[in-house]
Image: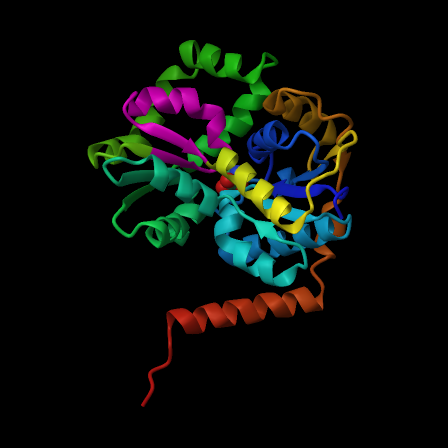
Amino acid sequence: MRSLPIGVFDSGLGGLTVVREFVRALPGESIVYLGDTARCPYGPRARSEVREFVLQIGAWLSARPVKLIVVACNTATAAGLALAQQAFDVPVIGVVEPGARAAVMATVNRRVGVIGTVGTVDSGAYSRAVRALDAGVTVFSAAAPRFVDFVEAGLRMDESPLEDWISQTADVFIRPSFYEMARDYLDPLKRAGIDTLVLGCTHFPLLSAAIQQVVGPNVRLISSAEETAREVVEALTARGHLAAGGSPDRRFFTTGDAIEFERLGSRVLGFETGRVEEVVLDDLTALLDNALRDQLTRFEGEELSETNPSKED
Ligand code: DGL
């Protein structure tokens, strides 16, 4: 068990910001990462569809096998974490709860902003997670879906290291449109007086310098990556499943273009991904067998009856 890899997935490249942190915190761990680039973005999709993706990818990772699964996507965590925890035998950890915990620890005035995809914001997952930790903290949320496009498209536009690209582009080409868009998303949160802003999408840490400029120096930015890495360390330590040593094997897969993923992924990670392998989408969708479909139907049925409890006479 100890030598098995940690399975990590996201809708695309964003989850690599979480892997970056894992490699810092857990340099000895092997990792299998799947970026579902062919179906990115997840943010605007129906919750039920995202849940199907979570089950497919969870089944794919479980078959490798892995010792733990990290859902390195806020949208997928908000839609499918609880379902995945029921469906798979290994522990499954998401990014929302760790991000909420980091924000609750950081805020002084107890006014926290959250930006994420439409799926994440509409789910109310961050508000619930923050309230469960400290009911006195007020959460102000805003969907910032175009930030995802900005990152995915921006990564494809230039060959220079990512942080250089952001500053270079912000200074030269994209600046007016990006800052205008960012102000539209962020000004209402600033007016609400937040002192902490959760980057509730794993793509957003790649824009943190620009986001910080818009919100100003008095707002602390929180990325859930570090806190998630801490939670993974705790989960593996508690079970005695931390890697014993030896050189880690890190393997990267995508449902999209493998050559492109290798080039862009290496830039996000700051180290070479090695050869990226392609996962055929039909093979992935075939993993959603009848047993998993039944589990999804049952889960959604229970969820419905919890939100609309029938009146007792
Ligand atoms: N990285 C995903 C997240 O954390 C968002 C990208 C998408 O919309 O697929 O929510």
Q: How is the image coloured?
A: rainbow
Whether residue 202 appears in this view of the structure is: no
Q: Is residue 129 left or right of residue 233?
A: left
Whether residue 151 appears in this view of the structure is: yes
Q: Is residue 283 left or right of residue 174?
A: right
Q: Position of residue 205 (x, y in %)?
A: 47, 28
Residue drawn at (66%, 64%), measured in percent from left and top?
292
Q: Position of residue 239 (x, y in %)?
A: 65, 51
Residue 38, quarter of picture:
top right
- What is the quadrant of the C terminus in the image? bottom left
Q: How many marks?
A: 0
Q: Is residue 58 above or below residue 192?
A: below
| Residue range corresponding to the magenta coloring | 197-223
Residue drawn at (59%, 47%), measured in percent from left and top?
235
Residue 25, quarter of picture:
top right
Residue drawn at (77%, 52%), measured in percent from left and top?
63
> Does the magenta segment cover residue 246?
no
Residue drawn at (26%, 30%), measured in percent from left and top?
187
> Does the magenta segment cover residue 214?
yes
Q: Position of residue 226 (x, y in %)?
A: 51, 33
Q: Position of residue 52 (x, y in %)?
A: 61, 57
Q: Nearer the viewer, residue 172 or 22?
A: 22
Q: Residue furthest bottom?
A: 313
Q: Nearer the viewer, residue 267 or 92?
A: 92
Residue 26, quarter of picture:
top right
